[in-house]
């Protein structure tokens, strides 16, 4: 576990850099669990791309996914900090 922390892996709280799809999945799960436990409603996280050609394109779909995933995590952390009464359900907004 210490080796993972040294490399900057995502922690149980969803913190850390998102370098792989697994990192994003772990962060999404950790933040969603925290939100559920606190009664905070979050929008759905971004879906991992399924259209990557694997050629290392400039502007790869994975770059967009990681940017969206980081934004979702940041937004989720803000929602958790605000608490359940300060946030409206995105589905009804």
Image (cartoon, rainbow, N blue to C red):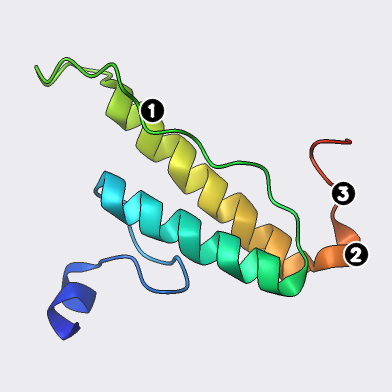
Which residue does the numbered mark 1 point to in the structure image? Answer: 64
Element class at badge 2: helix
Which residue does the numbered mark 3 point to in the structure image? Answer: 88
Element class at badge 1: helix
Q: In this view, does 2 lie to the left or right of 84?
A: left
Q: Is residue 92 left or right of residue 29?
A: right
**What x and y, as percent, mark residue 2?**
18, 84
**Which residue: 71% across, 59% down?**
79
Picture quadrant of residue 12: bottom left
CA distance separating discs 3 and 1: 26 Å
Image height check: is 77 above or below 24? below
Q: Which mark is residue 41?
A: none
CA distance separating discs 3 and 2: 8 Å
**Which residue: 48% across, 59% down?**
29
**What x and y, as percent, mark residue 77?**
61, 62
Image height check: is 16 above or below 69? below
- Local crowd at mark 2 within 10 Å, few (<14), some, or many (≥20)? few
- Local crowd at mark 1 within 10 Å, few (<14), some, or many (≥20)? few
**What x and y, as percent, mark residue 59?**
28, 19
Which residue does the numbered mark 2 point to in the structure image? Answer: 85
- Local crowd at mark 3 within 10 Å, few (<14), some, or many (≥20)? few
Quadrant holding the N terminus: bottom left
CA distance separating discs 2 and 1: 31 Å
């Amino acid at each position: 576990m210490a080796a993972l922390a040294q490399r900057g892996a995502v922690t149980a709280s969803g913190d850390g850099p998102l370098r792989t799809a697994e990192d994003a999945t772990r962060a999404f799960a950790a933040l969603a669990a925290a939100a559920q436990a606190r009664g905070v409603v979050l929008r759905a996280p971004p879906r991992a791309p399924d259209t990557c050609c694997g050629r290392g394109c400039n502007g790869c779909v994975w770059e967009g996914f990681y940017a969206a995933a980081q934004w979702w995590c940041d937004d989720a952390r803000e929602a958790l900090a605000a608490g359940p009464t300060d946030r409206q359900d995105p589905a009804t907004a």
